[in-house]
Image (spheres, helix red, strand yellow):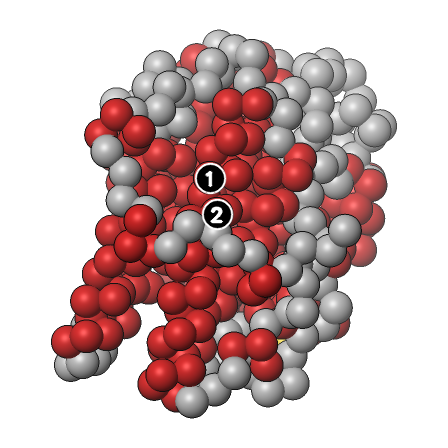
Amino acid sequence: MAFDPMQENGIPLDEQIRSWRELNVEPFDPDVVHPYTRCRVITMNGIEMESIFFSHNFARHTNDTELRRQLALSRYVESQQQRVVNWLLPGWSSVLETTIAYEQVATDLTSWVARNEPDPYLRQAYEFGVLEDFDHLYRYSNLYEMIEHRKAEKIIDELTEVMPARPTRMHHRHPVDNVRKNYDRDATDPLSKLHQLTIMSAEQQTLNFYANTGPQYMEPIARQLYQEIAMVEEEHVTHYESLLDGEETWLEQLLLHEYNECYLYYSFMEQEVEPRIKRIWELHLAMEIGQLQAACDLLRRYEDRDPAELLPREIPSVLLFEPNKEFLRTLLAEQMDLTTLGTGYVRDQHERFVKMQERLQGDGPPPSDLVVAAHEERFGGDYRSEQEGPHPVASMRRQSGAEARV
């Protein structure tokens, strides 16, 4: 049966503040948790952090005291939700293990969105970006075996393959070529707006995570790799945020944030396999319904608009974490050599791209190449996990005689 959060009661916003005991959740066991449960936790942490940052920025762009008070209340509750979600992550997982899970999120979440995006231009933006996240998973997985002497399958199982994609050294574009065309707020499918907000939020959280955790490593190669990929994540946030129509009002965006959280908590509640975490998704969904209703009231009061005109009539088909192996292999075969030029995509390495490469890499190969070279020197080959056969691009396959390490 279709689910419409606009027709549900939820928990009233002023009843949502919880005690310390309620916030003190038990983390999941990383050795037994389903990889996609971990992915859902990481995703919702990014979604909650985006909501909090957005609310703070909104409050800094209005002098209306009553509106600021309303934002402060909902933001406090969102902050409690974020603490619960993020505190589900176990303290005994290493930063690099969490990093590999972040890249599994980026790979499979963005793949699902690309497969289900109705707008061709937006779909191309996700298809382009996911081939770069897919390569980051490969680079970090090689680093993981070198530093912690474990294989990435320990974290991601065989749900997501590990293989080279668009090489990370080719991700470094001139900043102006990371800006895409925005969607039209009045003509775009509401589902497309939810997709854009979801992927932007996840990429922003990944950027924050890498920028803050990278310096914690002692190994020079790890510090360098985190620094390089954090710069790519900066590009990705620019890429995805530029898809947003900047003419949307603050209250319109607030409404979309709250609806998107309903959409995602409902989606994850529907597919969660861990009963204890499923109950958290259920509770947070009920809370988000109350926050959505409060946002609807603000839109009616301040802009005299009907929220129903901006939102889907019901929750779209649930967003799923699931394997995307065939989809990614098809993209590798068809789009691995793309780069950007202006707001479009080209296969030629144009002058601005070449100059950017020379500026960044004129004195030697980037860390993303060095980490794979170091792995090959130590183990006799790179690390991969290819369940569906050889790499779809012949030039990216292992040289004959190299041992498969799957």
Residue kind at label 2, given as amino acid type = Ala
Percent position (x, y) of residue 126?
Answer: 64, 59
Residue type at tag 1:
Leu
Residue 143 visible somewhere in the drawing: no
Label 2 neighbour load within 10 Å: few <14, some 14-19, many 20+: many
The residue labelled by disc 1 is: 283
Residues marked 2 and 1 touching at CB (< 8 Å): yes
Secondary structure at badge 2 equals: helix
Residue at image point 42% right, 50% down: 11
Q: Residue at x 35, y 42 (%)?
A: 81
Residue that mark 2 sits on: 286
> In which quadrant of the rendered view does residue 32 lie?
top right
Residue nearer the viewer, 383 or 305: 305
Residue at the limit of the structure toward the front, as seen here: 9
Q: Residue 120: in sight, yes or no? A: yes
Residue 218 lies, with reference to residue 186, above or below; the image says above
At x 57%, y 23%, the residue is 275
Q: Where does residue 117 sit, x and y in percent of width and height?
A: 71, 63
